[in-house]
Amino acid sequence: MKRLLLLGSSGSIGTQTLDVVRAMPGDFSIVGLSAHRNVELLARQAAEFHVRYVAVTDSQAAKRAKALLPAGTKLFVGAEGLLRLCQACAGKADMAVAAVVGIAGLPAVAACIEGGMDIALANKETLVAGGALVEALIARHGVRLYPVDSEHSAIFQCMQGLPDEQAVRKIILTASGGPFFGYTRQQLENVTVAQALKHPNWAMGSKITIDSASMMNKGLEIIEARWLFHMPPERIDVVVHRQSIVHSLIELNDNSILAQLGQPDMRIPIQYALVYPRRVAGPAPALDLCRAGPLTFEAPDRENFPCLNLAYQALGKGSAACIAVNAANEAAVELFLAEKIRFLDIPRIIEKALGDAPNGDSSQLYDILALDTAVRNSVLRR
Ligand code: NDP
Ligand code: MG
């Protein structure tokens, strides 16, 4: 039985992870859970899975949690409490599922690696801002990291059985194009929050849904791919594939292309990360190819969706630029969701942060978080 610590259990990835666990009774136990505000759901999950340790990061919500949690469940509170949860689970959990949204997940992932846990990583911002740190910690502690992000899971799946990583010439990330694919600049100026939250193919948390609409999600995924697969930016391509059936591809030296296909259902990549390398029945539905309709591929519109190029530029500038771009994006998305800025202000804010970012690299946790806070505050106080 694999023992799991699930960070961000109340979210879209968190709840789907528990679907996978339910579908495989006897395969997993849940040692720890965390939520930010949704303590009602967290308490139900803690009761259902007999969980010993939980963390609630929002201190107001934590006050409500005490009355809701089953007797005997130990509660840790605040951002500090999230770290203490990870430390309490060291030696008791084999794998941590990182499904917190944003940079808030980075210190927790670092603590889980230090606690000897393998990582199933959904929380892409952790690698975007802390790729070098995570890579160094993984090497030092001898743990493994499995991608959950569907594109990176697809690439990871395609790479199984290759003689070596040198066989891959390039990786090709697919992008749905989001709800505004084909929009002109003028149309994009006037889109609303409600429109941006309507993703054509995936039901996800609000932050990543806005990232998908701006295509910053694909930008973050380019940086994530650089760390997961050690690929230079010029060997990472993006192709728009509206149907989200082909989850990504790799091109090999002999011009053969391998792809992974499936329903747009995150439970497939979550399950693969959890049970790797096994291929067993799970909760996600099968894909009927004859009903999937035509599958199309086209070049992304880099002019109207500048976030893609901004991500490539950040990778070229260094890891400090990636931290700044990620922080600016998180803050900009927060402002957009609060209807304080317009949709096209998101790339403008990211571009400014990229220009202001220092050259070079930042790979210590303290430095990463300090730069993140500085950039975030400068955007929020504008
Ligand atoms: P959600 O918004 O649905 O869930 C986020 C989770 O993180 C919730 O449990 C939330 O708690 C918790 N959380 C929010 N803020 C904080 C904080 N400051 N500190 C600690 N915990 C916090 O997001 P998703 O599940 O959609 O995404 C999670 C991560 O996975 C993101 O990095 C996203 O990019 C990535 N991802 C998601 C995919 C998807 O299909 N959803 C696909 C690929 C990657 P609460 O709900 O209690 O507020
Ligand atoms: Mg993805």
Image: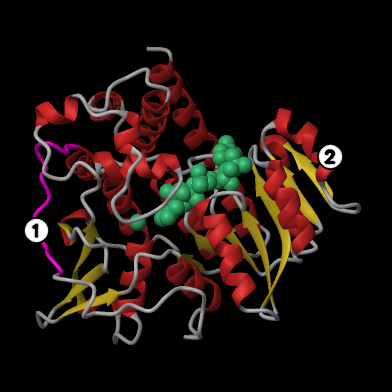
Q: Is residue 372 above or below residue 65?
A: above
Chain-order first, disc 1 or disc 2: 2
Q: Residue 149: x percent and y percent?
A: 40, 60
Any magenta on residue 22? no
Identity, as a three-letter code, of the amino acid under mark 1: Glu
Q: Bounds of the magenta span?
A: 295-306
User: Which mark is on residue 298?
Assistant: 1
Towards the viewer: 209 or 154? 209
Which quarter of the figure is the N terminus placed in? bottom right
Q: Residue 133: x percent and y percent?
A: 48, 50
Residue under label 2: 66
Mark 2 nearby-residue class (10 Å; few <14, some 14–19, many ≥20): some
- Residue 126 shows in the view: no
Measured in 3D between alpha carbons, the distance from the residue under mark 1 to the one under mark 2, in whole angstroms, is 52 Å
Identity, as a three-letter code, of the amino acid under mark 2: Lys
Looking at the image, residue 111 sits to the left or right of residue 319; the answer is right
